[in-house]
Amino acid sequence: MTKEPIIRVDNVTFSYQVNQEQVIPVLHGVSMEVFSGEYLAIIGHNGSGKSTLSKHLNGILTPHQGDVWVNGINTREKTRIHEIRSQVGMVFQHPDNQLVATIVEDDVAFGLENIGVPPDEMSARVNDALDAVGMSAFRHRPPHHLSGGQKQRVAIAGILAMKPRCLVLDEATSMLDSYGRQEILQVVRQLHREGMTIVTVTHHMSEVAEADRVLVMEGGQIVMEGTPREVFARQDRLRELHLDVPDASRIAQLVHAQNRAFSPDLIHNHEIV
Ligand code: ADP
């Protein structure tokens, strides 16, 4: 891992303007960086601002104060939004909302059509992306016939086809069953091994254990940062923040699980979380 930031969030403040009278302040001077090649987990209690922060990482939301830079491009530069989105791809919670086409391969090609990739290159990119998520055999299937985990893998393929440097997963496994979650973790783990930068917003401690670094949010601020071991070790503080606290033996088990190869038997027989 090099210490080159792909994303720099600099003193960002953000509120949702619900209507003329109602403004919900969410982020309060958040600064963070995402470094090339790292696996970063963002955790925090519901409503702490994780999702709002993650939507700033590829310009879906722009700060009211402060700046977000993606590969040196300020996300306020809306004319460069395609460049930003092709660097940083986002996967959301509900796979159904992300799939738009009637067959899987068209879905994966959708973003490429939007940016005018030539047909030959498009076909090669779709093949590579479907291979990377293990979904090549399903390329002619309608997405709505797939399981939750398979749909989410197709959604990831659609992003990989854009050749991003960074993948942001915003609670991308939270609607999936244990098997689906393991399918996604397997893909993400492999992408990370191949050099992809990963940012994951999650409340599953087994996913946190996979990360190189963890940010903990509370009340729209980052209140703790460290390796999974360092963060898990601060049990009193995690309890104050209403977060799950795995005990010491559980942490060892989680970190050990991260080094095991994926095996469907393992998943069927042992619920990891
Ligand atoms: P988290 O991901 O940590 O659960 P969010 O970023 O989703 O937190 O939400 C932070 C706060 O912003 C919450 O109080 C939530 O109700 C509010 N919020 C989130 N999205 C919207 C929205 N689109 N409009 C208004 N308020 C929102």
Image (tube, rainbow, N blue to C red):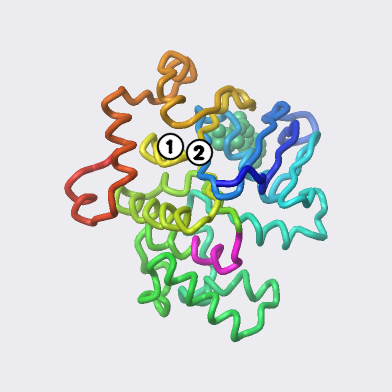
Q: Which residue is mark 2?
A: 41
Q: Position of residue 205 (x, y in %)?
A: 38, 34
3D distance between C-alphas at marks 1 and 2? 6 Å
Which amino acid lies under the numbered mark 1 shown in the image of this protein?
Val
> Which part of the image, by quadrant, shows the C terminus?
top left
Q: Residue furthest front?
A: 2
Q: Residue at x 79, y 48 (%)?
A: 74
Asked where in the image residue 135 lies, by quadrant, the reply is bottom left
Q: Which residue is mark 1?
A: 208
In this rendering, the count of numbered labels is 2
Image disc number at residue 35: none
Q: Is residue 30 left or right of residue 174?
A: right
Which amino acid lies under the numbered mark 2 shown in the image of this protein?
Ala
Q: Secondary structure at mark 1?
A: helix
The magenta segment is 156-164
| Circles 1 and 2: CB atoms closer than 8 Å | yes
Q: Secondary structure at mark 2?
A: strand
